[in-house]
Image (cartoon, rainbow, N blue to C red):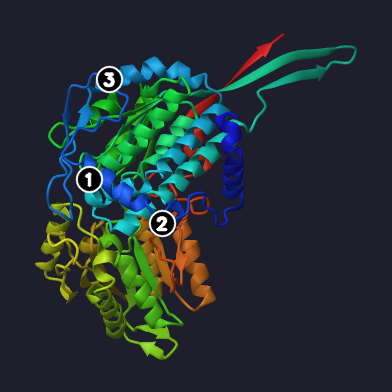
Amino acid sequence: MNLFEKHKPMLDSAVAANANRTFFHAFPENMKAYGEEAQVSGLASFQKAMNADFMELSQEMPLRFEGEEVSPYLQVGLGIRYPVFADKILVLNAQNVADAWRKTSVQDRAGILIESLERMSKRFFEIAYGTMHTTGQSFVMSFQASGPHAADRALETIAMGFQELTRFPETATWEKPMGKYSLMLNKKWSAVPKGISLVIGCSTFPTWNTVPGMFASLITGNPVIVKPHPKAILPIAIVIAEMQKVLAENNLPTNIIQLAVDSSKFPLAKELAQHPDVKLIDFTGNSIFGNWLETLALSGKKVFTEKAGVNSVIIDSTSNAKAMADNLAFSVSLYSGQMCTAPQNFFIPEDGIETENGTLSFDETATLITNSIEQLVDNPKMGAGVLGCIQNDATITRVLELAGSESKILMGSKTVVNAEFENARTASPIVLQVDASNSSLFTKELFGPIVLIIKTKNTKESISLAKKLATSHGAISCAAYTTSSESMETIAYEMASSFTGVSFNLTGGIFVNQNAAFSDFHVTGGNPSGNASFTDPNYVNGRFVWVGHKFA
């Protein structure tokens, strides 16, 4: 049995899930599903990797080994060094293997890629510890986001690519009746990959945000160079090492997928992106660099970006005020707000909101939300685990700067003790009250544990401001609370006009931060927060072109 036959049931299920948009997961998020010893083994493997050269990659003759990852929990360097290669060598390696991967059938590609995900799943716990100690996510979040959720997102992309590549027949006989005779041609079509793909990773979600672009380019026949953030390499390095092993086992060049390590002092991203033979670029990160990358489309490159956004919460009314506040408190506290989907701006009418117990004034609504955040942060069983750690010093600096601003502070940020890691770099959310006229403060992304509660004239102004922000500055998520069907329809319509989806009335165990593979399109690609959406058909179709030949 070849790999395509082995994994066809999973592929078929994924293709169906993409079409139906209902709940589906191929890789369980329950840790127990991976065996009783898996976590212990994963921790041991992670500890063994520390203070050593990463030797698992099948990439020969590196210039040197280097690494600068620092654990936000331990506040010490991991000491892991990775092979470093010149940008021209990486591109040359990709050029040399491009034909081999292009000539591999889409069925074989799919089998190899899904087998790689299966191998990755054997190392979910090791990847989780690597994610935890590079990003600052909690262990549970690291396991789920970098493990099963990332693998599901990759499988979703494989399925979408497979579906698009097999949408049309490979051959057809074309016959045009002409009366007494017919004109006939035999026709043949092939999906030709665009060329070398560069995937630029981010520091907060090193696999979840990286694998969609990787697998979208690979399933469509393009060799891939992955350039991770220098502060978060290990998780994706493990994934690439497993992929290279599977390629070698199937007599294919391992350089079809390469890891490109750089450093903060000597970055490689610009050099790789500008190389004339790099035709595809995926990027997750800040808007300044993302905007520059998008200009490279003028030179014939196809660029897929996920950048910064200003995410809003529109509060009009609610049937359960405490549940609303608790849900929002969790959303802003999760991973200390270091998520592209985390809510930032809370728009509340100056006359307050209607609740199940009557009108709640603006001040009372703000206090209810603030108290819920404080209760969560101070909960010894939940606080440290939900917050995780701050990934870099710039986020701490941003919080401190806001604490010194002239805005009214409803709740200050504080260090939260992590019982397991005494040196953990933590910060609870800071909550500021802002008037709607002070737009200079809330019309930009304030990445990290920062909440702005903004007083508006009414819900109409709240909607207008949220829409304007999404249109001008981008938004990846939006939450809204209303008991009015008319208001719900208006919010949905207006935010859709800015290409932003809305999560309405979340009060339980589902939060605005979350996006489900096979169901939710992550980023719409329609506003300044990003020009691509994974995973819709455009995300894969832009990586190849249909070429047809005619035979008389």
Residue 480 visible, this angle: yes
Labels 3, 2: front one:
2
Q: Amino acid at mark 1?
A: Gln
Name the mark nearer the viewer: 3 or 1: 1
Q: Quarter of the image for the N terminus: give it.
A: top right
Tag 2 or tag 3, which sits nearer the N-term?
A: 2
The answer to whether any part of residue 523 appears in the image is no
Furthest toward the front, the residue is: 37
Above or below residue 524? Residue 82 is: above
Query: What residue is disc 2 on?
Result: 31
Horizontal side of residue 405 vs 329, given as left or right? left
Q: What secondary structure is found at the residue carrying circle 3?
A: loop
For the residues labelled 1 and 2, the Cα–Cα distance comes to 20 Å
Amino acid of disc 3: Glu
Q: Which residue does the numbered mark 3 point to in the structure image?
A: 60
Please report contact status of discs 1 and 2: CB closer than 8 Å, yes or no. Answer: no
Determine whether label 3 and label 1 are within 8 Å by CB: no
Residue at image x 50%, y 37%? 114
Q: Which residue position is annotated with label 1?
A: 47
User: Which residue type carries mark 2?
Assistant: Met
Whole-percent x, y for residue 5 in the image:
61, 33
Task: Report the residue that reaches farthest toward the left.
Answer: 404
Q: Residue at x 25, y 64 (%)?
A: 387
Label 2 packing within 10 angstroms: few (<14), some (14-19), many (20+) = some
| Badge count | 3
